[in-house]
Image (cartoon, rainbow, N blue to C red):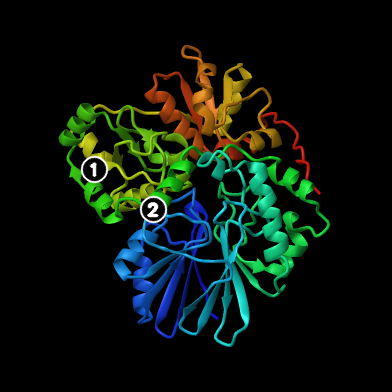
Amino acid sequence: MKVEQIYTGCIAHAAYYIESKGEAAVFDPLREVQPYIDRAEKDGAKMKYVFETHFHADFVSGHLDLAKKTGADIVFGPTAKPGFEAIVATDNQEFKVGDYTIKTIHTPGHTMESTTYLLIDENGKEHGIITGDTLFIGDVGRPDLAQHVIADLTEEKLAAHLFDSLRNKIMPLSDDLIVYPNHGAGSACGKKMSTETTDTLGNQKKTNYALRPDMTKEEFIKELLTGLTTPPGYFPKNVLMNIQGYESLDKVMDRAKKPMDAATFELVANESRPLILDTRPADDFHKGFIPNSINIGLDSNFAMWVGELIPDIKQEILLVTETGKEEESIIRLSRVGYDHAIGYLEGGFEAWEKAGKEVDQINRISAEEFAKEIATGTKVFDVRKASEFDSQHVIGANNTPLGNINDYLAEFPKEEKFILHCAGGYRSMIASSILKARGWDNFVDVVGGFKAIEATNVPVSEYVCPTTLL
């Protein structure tokens, strides 16, 4: 049986495509559905089903657009209550895709409608399980997301459901089944996912902390809930979009793909006060940018940081991108529900400069210059996560994680010079742009971040191995 994993690294997401005898199905598609349509057309296949493992929180699924464009039926697991036409399957219900059989296994815990799909080949042999956020490689889905949509679903209740689902529905299955999860390392839907994106169920039973056979339900709940960070603020909004429906991506693209010359861009920016989002790399942004614009580069976890730092999912956005990256920027915004981009600067930042418009800059220093600066007592602000900071950091640095930067604004001095850094320079440039837009000027950013600083003689804290839950 052939299962094609379509992995999107920037949001650590895996969709799956299968085809048999001229019929095709997709599991957990992304918002931009044309690649799935093209894939089926290449096989000469008709899209029959769009299977959803659950109502996703970390991205807006493409189920509605894909169904509309192909005539496929949308399938959810038991208890799902979508606000649009779909098949709500019963536990153990079977669906045929050519000679393949897909069996629904209701596995509540990450969410109540969470469902695993058992894949059975043309010979009746069980091949693998598409697990959504129920089971990852090295981890299981966090049980604290649904309560942000339904208050009664506490994380303890969901964790208990997940324990039962894993023990009663997943672990009794054959060891040679291949596990196909919805996410890999880097996703906020778990806490210790592997960089591997598939494995055998038998190996997961041996290595995944959550599948220990001697674990009590109480132990499972405690270990699962320990160390969970606050989920990004956009998660509940994406869940509601996936449940209730959303605007077609085609309409979103039509609204956003409006090129503006510098004069028009400036006029729109001044009149409607949209957010100016600059998606260029940090190395380009710091040299020159439109005043008050925020830098979140496409070259890393763009969608995640957009969701983390832009609180209003309906915020109007004007884009500044590298030439040729306009459409990619719009699509990657839409993946997490930011559908209200209203145009982009034609010709990019170079067009703004050529028009003689006002330009701002962010000063940067090398790691060697950093070493000299801190010797004079200059304050240092490290915007990495608390876990990274606790692992190792510059002695005397303040930890002000980027994801919670609004909580730390009072700590940044307005008159006194200070230094920002992160691990490699991406997050600290985001922080720099936010501070600049809010009136801070007397600071510098470190090129290469902590990775570069470690290569100097700057004193850093000793590495402390984090406690492993066994």
| Residue at 62% across, 41% down | 154
Q: Which mark is residue 206?
A: none
For the residues carrying marks 1 and 2, which lies nearer the camera in this image? 2
Q: Nearer the viewer, residue 331 or 156?
A: 156
Farthest-out residue, right: 214
Residue 25 in percent (x, y) is at: 44, 72
| Residue at 58% across, 31% down | 368
Relative to 299, 467 lies left or right: right
Q: Which residue is mark 2?
A: 83
Compared to residue 270, the image places residue 315 above or below, namely: below
Could you tell me which quadrant the N terminus lies in? bottom right
Q: What amino acid is at disc 1?
A: Gly
Residue 164 seen: yes
| Residue at 60% across, 85% down | 124
Q: Which mark is residue 343?
A: 1
| Cα separation between marks 1 and 2 | 30 Å
Residue 275 in percent (x, y) is at: 32, 33
Helix, strand or loop at label 2? It is: loop
Q: Nearer the viewer, residue 204 or 409?
A: 204
Q: What amino acid is at disc 2?
A: Gly
Relative to 289, 354 lies left or right: left
Residue 18 in percent (x, y) is at: 47, 75
Residues packed near mark 1 inside 10 Å, few (<14), some (14 to 19) or many (20 plus): many
Residue 134 in percent (x, y) is at: 61, 57
Relative to 33, 239 lies left or right: right
